[in-house]
Amino acid sequence: MSRRVKLTAIGNSTGVVLPKDLLEKLRVGRGDELLILETPDGIRLTPYDPEFADQMEVAERIMREDRDLLRKLAQ
């Protein structure tokens, strides 16, 4: 699916208005938070899940701290 949306001014910021059917597919509404992920294929937009975000923070910390060990395990 591809769709064009316009950028709009929101105070001193810029925002995107998402169509209602897309919000329904994401199962989000006004006031909910979204997570923007940069992927090799582009940008991915998903509902924000605080539990998942906490798990990712722990995983990133472990990967930083144990980088050498993880590199050896990958060989």
Image: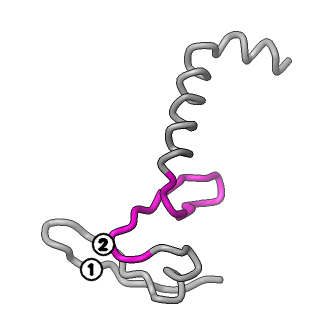
Q: Secondary structure at mark 1?
A: strand
Magenta residues (range)? 29-49
Crowdedness near tag 1: few (<14), some (14–19) or many (≥20) residues, C-alpha within 10 Å: few
Q: Position of residue 16 (x, y in %)?
A: 36, 76
57 lies left or right of 74: left
Q: Do the residues bearing badges 1 and 2 touch, measured as CB atoms within 8 Å? A: yes
Is 19 above or below relative to 9?
Answer: below
User: Based on the displayed image, in which of its 4 quarters is residue 70 positioned?
Assistant: top right
Q: Quadrant of the C terminus?
A: top right
Q: Which residue is mark 1?
A: 8
69 lies left or right of 34: right
Q: Which residue is mark 2?
A: 15
Amino acid type, label 2? Gly
Label 1 and label 2: CA atoms lie apart by 5 Å
Asked if the stretch drawn in magenta spans residue 31, the answer is yes
For the point 54% across and 28% down, which residue is it? 58
